[in-house]
Amino acid sequence: MASVTYDHVYKRFGDVVAVNDLNVHIEDKEFLVFVGPSGCGKTTSLRLLAGLEEISDGNILIGDRIVNDVPPKDRDIAMVFQSYALYPHMSVYDNMAFGLKLRKTPKSEIDRRVKEAADILDIGHLLDRKPKQLSGGQRQRVAVGRAIVREPAVFLFDEPLSNLDAKLRVQTRSQLTRLHQRLATTFIYVTHDQVEAMTMASRIAVMKDGILQQIDTPQHLYDHPNNVFVAGFIGSPSMNFFDATLTENDGKLEVNTGGFRLDVPNEKAAEWRQFKGREVVFGIRPEDIHAKPFVPPGILESDLRARVDVTELMGNEIFLYLMTKDDKQFIARVDPRVQTHPGDEVDMAINMTNAHIFDPKTEVSLAA
């Protein structure tokens, strides 16, 4: 087993900096997820670790060993790609065993590892089949099994669930989490899907334009985003943002967007008062906007009246797309008992305890 360290790592493609001064230490047995939009550098970071791309500057360590110049086959890693990359003419057993045969592993050891991996992934009954006889989810499990039999120090996953349908993605997600717990080895996973990241990772590294924006546990990223990008990327639906000014009225601090005003509760005001008079970006998550009279007990609320634009009924909840007086749209995630229709005026309660403010120029959190 091994830790992984990116030490001031750069990757340049001509004038394009795909990975910019990446510094991450991944503990042994950790499940770390790189997440971000397309082109953010997450897959390049994984390929640098795998040895499929050359590092422009910096060092990558697996354990205490710098692996910059170590061939991919000698790095003690196994990679699972978005495409299953199975040999169509080989059986499942032979696909899983192929890498071990190339390494001249004894036949008895190959048989043990393949059957053990098949048992872990519940594909023992498929060992004699060809890939064309398998579903997408089964093919993906074979690809994972091919990695498991190598018994590597580090597993790398490059968007392995992208080709699966929604239901199968959820099912396979939980299987990978159980697999990590069972194998007790280091998993590094790349995805653009923040739901995958939130549900699987022990820590998440959020990237944008080749730069690491924030790395932390899923809950801490959700509760304490460093900047507007992280706040908007983590959470679904994403956080609502409003251009606003912090003003004072009769000794009470307010968030003034021009279209509405919200009272800032005393405990928040003590933290935010230093920014009084400043322009800010005010952020509030859809789940912190409640329809009256279905406001949870114990929250510090401030009221807002808005017009319903669109409703999305989800069964266990409703997404309300609302418009302020100055025609700015925002989303609320409300109780399914709320009865409302497009065009209705509704009273909403904002949970100010979980509100955020950011600098409009740097987009950095002012309350981090």
Image (cartoon, helix red, strand yellow):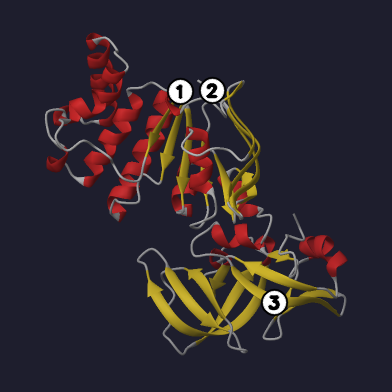
Residue type highlighted by circle 1: Asp
- Whole-percent x, y for residue 336 in the image: 41, 69
Q: Is residue 360 left or right of residue 321?
A: right
- Is residue 297 shown to the viewer in this render? no
Toward which corner of the image does residue 353 lie, by quadrant?
bottom right
Reading the image, the residue beneath label 1 is 76
Reading the image, the residue beneath label 2 is 2
**x 68%, y 83%: residue:** 260
**x 44%, y 35%: residue:** 156
- Whole-percent x, y for residue 309 in the image: 47, 84
- Location of residue 23 with respect to 281 vertically, above or below: above
- Tell which circle, 3 or 2, labels the residue nearer the N-terminal end: 2
- Tell which circle, 1 or 2, labels the residue nearer the N-terminal end: 2
Residue type highlighted by circle 3: Asp
Instruction: Determine the CA span between mark 1 and mark 2.
Output: 9 Å
Report if the CB atoms under discs 3 and 2 are less than 8 Å apart. Answer: no
Reading the image, the residue beneath label 3 is 243
Q: Which of 78 and 267 is in front in this view?
A: 78
